[in-house]
Image: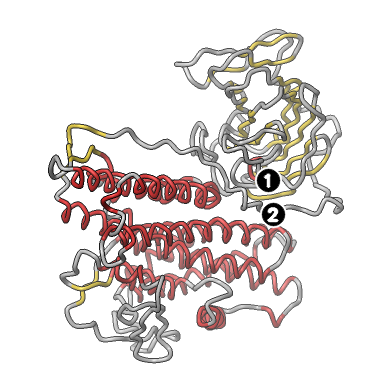
Amino acid sequence: MTRYVLALVLALITAAPANGQNEAGEKAPFPFPEAAPKKDWAWDKDKRFDELMEQLAINEASLDAVDAAIAKKTRKKGSQIGSSKRFDENNRFMDRKGGGPMNWREFYGTNAEKFFYHPVDPNTTYHTTTALQQIGKAQDDKTSSDIPTRQGLPVHQRPPQWDYIYRANRTASENALADAALLATEVEQLEQRRAQLEQEQAVFWCKLAFRAVQRIDMQRKTILRFQLIAAGDGNEENEQARALAAAAQFLSSALLIVEKAEEEQSVAMGSANTVVVEARERFEDALLEQPSLESISEDKGKPLGQFVALAKLLGDKSKTLSEAYAGAMDGAANNEAARKKSYRGMLQRTVIDYAQILLALNELADAMKKEWGVRVDTKTKLEGQTIEWRVSASVQGPVLPKDIARTVTAPDDTPKNDEIHLISKDSLDGWISTDSGEPNNWIVKDGVITLIAKGSSLISKHKFKDFDLHFEFALPKACNSGVFLRGRYELQLIDPAYRLPSGKELTPLGQLGAIWGQIPSSRISYRGNDKWNTCDVRLVNRNVSVRINKIVVIDRKDIPDVTQGALDKDENQPGGIMLQSQDITGVKFRDITVRPIK
């Protein structure tokens, strides 16, 4: 990575001029279509957006290098993908409105066109107009067949930033090829590296698309944070204020997906459908209680009617987000390249659509506030929304066929002399509470740690980097607990019969043995409530394997990110083994043993 950073700095210092030529006056090998700026249109500069795009370009250079290395190792010469071939292939995929994701260049252009290129003096519903075209027939003003555009916006522009990003990408590509050659010779390790890069790539897609929302601090809007006051004392004025408050609450809920995607993309994408659809139901129920607004709530010529229509469209997009994320994971887990590519392309396009609709809803909320004369009481702050992040039942993630025997290279069952036993017979020596404000309600007796009441979680004083972990656990009925590896990645320990507050069953991302919200458990292996179950874990960097009762439930998967509730995010440092305290008491642990891997 240091090599990439140095290459990027060099590229920025020696950036090519904005005409697409290098210092020798030669045309870049993959010039993007030039287009004269449309009259009275402006380009918004956003440094953070450019920085994220540079990182995405470097990420894709590494992906290309790994793909080429895999092709070489497997002797599939015809499958090697160079940059130009990959660009052309992705453009063809997009022309068919299916298949794989756009490359960084086209993704830049699509984001730029939708969010950063607009009339100098745009009216208040600029984004609304373009977003509503997704419902009806979209217009297209492209000037030639080689300029991709999929909506009634001006043709793609070629911002000046393109040149130095392109050059950084070329330099990084050369370095990535060299690094891939030094990578381990096994194809399996290359494929794990590719999966890690693809996960990182999807995170960049979200950050770039959602940057258009975050840069205007939409979540800080006063109508989303404070009490609204009607323009008058009449019944209609009061109903208008209540309708706007309901619309603001819906927008706030939808924005939570944007914020969550920065922390835990898997949870955000898996929960998107549940969060947005339930928020839309609350919004529409609130409108039913405002009878004077019934006629305009169905009129797409009015801001409220447009808001209702786009709320429905956002619900559809949130469902696509959840399904596309699950489909991409499933395709990756089962080595179905075409399926993975198609769903990743769908995910990439949908995050852009989601961001655009949010911008349109923001415009419409302002339009309704102005039209109805609603005021904001900045002395009365609303309570922040609390969301129970739960993966939609329709998102199953990769589920391995139960008749396929899977093996894991480690941990093994051979006793080791360097094992560290973390539980004393009758003492909590070696353990500390994670929260000084909560009581420590863990006890030890005869080498068994038991949670007797809700309180602080417990973490070992010993800290570990890479390790094999063995422990035994017993769960009472409806128990939901977990073990945080290094205090950062939650290994889910839960009664398989547990039901969510909605009554729905757990998905593999929340089942026993899963890395909660990120890596699903491939199967359920459980001896029953209040019975002793065994668990064996190997964690090397972010790569994890898990066995429950000697059955492999996770086989050498990379953990995408730290789990919500982690003690810290300093992943380069060792961390302790944390036992989670939840509402249901009675969870027990014994024989917690760690063997560090040197």
Q: CA distance from mark 1 to mark 2?
A: 8 Å
Name the kind of residue labelled 1 in the image. Pro
Using the image, determine if residue 356 lies above or below residue 110: above
Looking at the picture, how far across and down is residue 55, in whole percent? 44, 62
Residue drawn 73% across and 52% down?
A: 399
**Residue 14 appears in view:** no
Residue visible at 57% across and 38% down? Answer: 502
Q: Is residue 485 left or right of residue 426?
A: left
Q: In this image, 260 relative to 267: left or right?
A: left
Q: Quadrant of residue 352?
A: bottom left
Q: Which mark is first along the chain, 2 or 1?
A: 2
For this view, does 426 lie left or right of residue 322?
right
Q: Which mark is residue 405?
A: none
Image coordinates of residue 213 in percent, x first then y, are 33, 56
Image quadrant for the C terminus? top right
Residue corresponding to mark 1: 508
User: Are circles 1 and 2 on residues that touch, CB within 8 Å?
Assistant: yes
Q: Secondary structure at mark 1?
A: helix
Looking at the picture, the colour scheme in use is: secondary structure
At label 2, the amino acid type is Pro
In the foreground, 108 or 312: 312
Name the residue nearer the viewer: 265 or 376: 376
Residue at 22%, 55% in the rendered image: 368
Seen in the picture, residue 40 relative to 145 is either above or below; the reply is: above
> Residue 398: which numbered mark, if any?
2
Mark 2 lies on a secondary structure that is: loop
Task: Please identify the residue farthest to the bottom as the structure is shown.
Answer: 144
